[in-house]
Each structure stands twice: as structure tokens, then as C-alpha cells.
Image (spheres, rainbow, N blue to C red):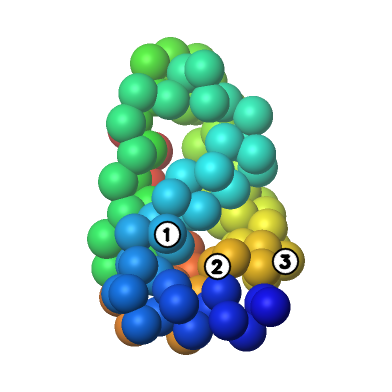
């Protein structure tokens, strides 16, 4: 069944949008700052996050590498995340605004 779901996602070309959504959910889970998150944008391996609180942004800024690693760890364990998608893959850089 898992293989059928993966084949359906690939054949309908849904993997880029689904992967982006899963990255945003992984951000919320890893950071715990979903209530302060105004916007999220993912492009070319970079996750851009706009936060409403400068204090939260400053605190998360010290943890950027750990957050990036935790997000990618969550994505590796996610069965719905298509790992070989050429457009949207793992987070290479985290940019906080």
C-alpha cells in the first residue's frame, strides 16, 4: 500500500507541493514557534521563516544548525515525504527574518 501511495504521488506530480507542506509542518514541530511564525517559504533548499517576535527570532538564531538537523531528521522519518524529488528535497539552509 505504501508503494501505491508513493507511485500515485509521483504520477500526479504532487510531490513538490506535498514535500513543501511537510517541511513547513516539520518546522512547526522542531521549532515550537508556530504561533510566532508569520510566513514560510521554501526554495532551492532554503527555508525562509518570518517571525513576529524579534526575541524568538534571536533565540532560534542561536539554534539554526540544530533546528535544520532536527527538521531533516523529522523528514527522513516521514513516510509521505518523497526523498528523491528534484525540486523540493531536504532543508540545506535556514533563514530567519
Residue 88 seen by the camera:
no
Q: Which residue is mark 3?
A: 77
Q: Are marks 1 and 3 in contact (CB under 8 Å)?
A: no
Residue beneath the point at 35% across and 23% down: 38
Above or below 52: residue 87 = below
Image quarter of the C terminus:
top left
Residue 29 in the image: state x and y as whole percent: 65, 39
Image quarter of the N terminus:
bottom right
Above or below 63: residue 12 = below
Residue beneath the point at 66% across and 63% down: 78
Q: Which residue is mark 2?
A: 81
Q: Secondary structure at mark 3?
A: helix
Q: In the drawing, does residue 86 fall left or right of residue 3?
A: left
Q: Are marks 2 and 1 in contact (CB under 8 Å)?
A: yes
Instruction: Determine the image quadrant of residue 79.
Output: bottom right
Q: Which residue is mark 1?
A: 18
Amino acid at each position: 500500500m505504501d508503494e501505491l501511495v508513493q507511485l500515485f504521488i509521483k504520477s500526479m506530480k504532487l510531490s513538490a507541493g506535498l514535500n513543501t507542506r511537510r517541511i513547513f509542518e516539520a518546522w512547526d514541530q522542531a521549532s515550537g514557534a508556530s504561533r510566532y511564525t508569520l510566513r514560510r517559504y521554501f526554495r532551492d533548499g532554503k527555508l525562509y521563516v518570518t517571525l513576529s517576535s524579534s526575541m524568538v527570532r534571536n533565540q532560534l538564531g542561536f539554534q539554526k544548525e540544530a533546528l535544520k538537523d532536527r527538521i531533516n531528521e523529522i523528514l527522513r522519518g516521514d513516510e509521505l515525504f518523497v526523498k528523491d524529488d528534484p525540486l523540493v528535497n531536504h532543508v540545506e539552509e535556514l533563514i530567519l527574518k
